[in-house]
Image (spheres, rainbow, N blue to C red):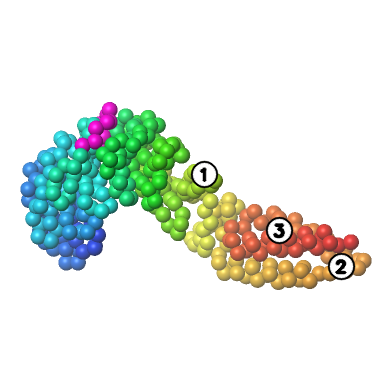
């Protein structure tokens, strides 16, 4: 794809994945056919740099933001401009409602504006910040907007009642990014104070703080996979991923992995079938519980342990010398298994070994 004569500032894919919109340091927006790579439309109308583009959820319209202090809503099929919105000066951030019917804009001033996509009219102006507004986002249901300012304060706005529900205070620097959890009950904020905070939206209470960053936290993302919540954060020194869990009303945040100055750190990792490691590195990682045995070895070990467990489970109360020999063997096996059990990461093998230890304990307790 070639066509822009200037540096590209923003790229967005349509929800259907068949079209791409791009903007450059020039004044135009280009729409591209993803399959053919051909430019289908050149959107002309802005008179200054177009700094960002985004698609509405239905993929039928594109919104562009320019340093000429306007937003333009374009028809993605025809390339025609449907509406031009005159926003505040130096507008820096946009948020689109989940339904695609509203756009919220924030600027270096202290106001937040909400626009009707269909008519291009300003629905409401939220006033209340005492510092420049840096970030803004809609809730998953579209009934709330949260905005963060350069002073570290965040405000929760009710889009229907058009009022401020509460203020979230705690950051010591500008709030660069805000994201909701998928359920809309939690909000995560990233700040220039080198921290990330998790908030309860209803109560306004700060549930957790992550502070082990070396620079400003510029971006964050909330990810849910297989019922597990993850928080990703990026700053000047790298990227990190934390697992977020809840236990009896308490919020717990665990670091899973992070990069810093090109180095990767893993927490509670259990990598199976690790390849390409020399003997020393492999042994060190195994001692630290970072990697497990290859899968085929685990299967072989499992079979051996199951056979041994079967033998022990059939042991009755032998007599005299035989009883002493079996007891001595059982004691040695029990000691070795107890030491090894803490190093085993594979759930299946760990369960088998635990059962084996219980069988031995049961035998030892029952012998005369």
Residue 274 vs residue 140: left or right?
A: right
Q: Quick one: label 2, few (<14), some, or many (20+) residues within 10 Å?
A: few
Residue at 20 percent of width and 39 percent of height: 124
Question: Which label's residue is closer to the chain start, 2 or 3?
Answer: 2
Measured as percent of width and height from the top left, residue 164 is found at 30, 35
Camera sees residue 192: no
Mark on residue 112?
Answer: none
Q: Find the distance from the CA under tag 2 to the CA under tag 3.
A: 22 Å
Q: Earlier in the sequence, mark 1 or mark 3?
A: 1
Q: Circle 1 — which element? A: loop
Q: Quadrant of the C terminus?
A: bottom right
Q: Is residue 292 left or right of residue 139?
A: right
Q: Which residue is mark 2?
A: 317
**Pointers 1 and 3 in contact (C-beta within 8 Å):** no
Pointer 1 residue = 249
Where does residue 55 sit, x and y in percent of width and height?
A: 21, 54
Magenta segment includes 148: no
- Mark 1–mark 3 Cα distance, whole angstroms, equals 37 Å
């Amino acid at each position: 794809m070639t066509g822009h004569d200037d540096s590209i500032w923003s790229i967005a894919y349509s929800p259907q994945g068949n079209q791409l919109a791009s903007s450059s340091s020039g004044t135009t927006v280009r729409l591209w056919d993803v399959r053919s790579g051909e430019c289908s439309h050149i959107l002309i109308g802005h008179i200054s740099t177009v700094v960002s583009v985004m698609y509405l959820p239905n993929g039928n319209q594109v919104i562009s933001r320019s340093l000429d202090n306007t937003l333009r809503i374009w028809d993605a099929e025809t390339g025609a401009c449907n509406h031009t919105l005159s926003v505040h000066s130096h507008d820096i951030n946009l948020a689109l409602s989940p339904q695609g019917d509203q756009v919220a804009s924030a600027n270096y001033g202290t106001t937040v504006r909400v626009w009707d996509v269909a008519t291009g009219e300003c629905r409401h102006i939220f006033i209340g910040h005492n510092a420049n507004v840096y970030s803004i986002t809609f809730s998953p249901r579209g009934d709330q907007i949260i905005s963060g300012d350069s002073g570290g304060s965040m405000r929760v706005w009710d889009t229907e009642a058009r009022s401020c529900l509460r203020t979230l205070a705690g950051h010591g620097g500008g709030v660069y990014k805000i994201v909701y959890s998928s359920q809309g009950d939690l909000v995560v904020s990233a700040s220039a104070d080198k921290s990330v905070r998790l908030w309860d939206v209803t109560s306004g209470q700060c549930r957790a703080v992550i502070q082990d960053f070396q620079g400003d936290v510029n971006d964050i993302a909330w990810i849910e996979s297989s019922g597990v919540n993850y928080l990703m954060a990026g700053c000047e020194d790298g990227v990190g991923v934390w697992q977020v869990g809840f236990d009896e009303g308490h919020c717990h945040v665990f670091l899973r992995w992070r990069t810093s100055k090109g180095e990767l750190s893993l927490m509670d990792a259990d990598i199976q079938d690790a390849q390409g490691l020399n003997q020393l590195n492999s042994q060190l990682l195994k001692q630290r519980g970072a990697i497990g045995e290859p899968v085929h070895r685990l299967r072989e070990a499992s079979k051996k342990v199951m056979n041994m467990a079967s033998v022990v489970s059939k042991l009755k109360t032998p007599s005299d010398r035989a009883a002493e020999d079996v007891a001595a063997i059982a004691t040695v096996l029990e000691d070795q298994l107890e030491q090894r059990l803490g190093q085993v990461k594979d759930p299946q093998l760990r369960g088998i070994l635990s059962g084996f230890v219980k069988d031995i304990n049961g035998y030892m307790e029952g012998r005369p």
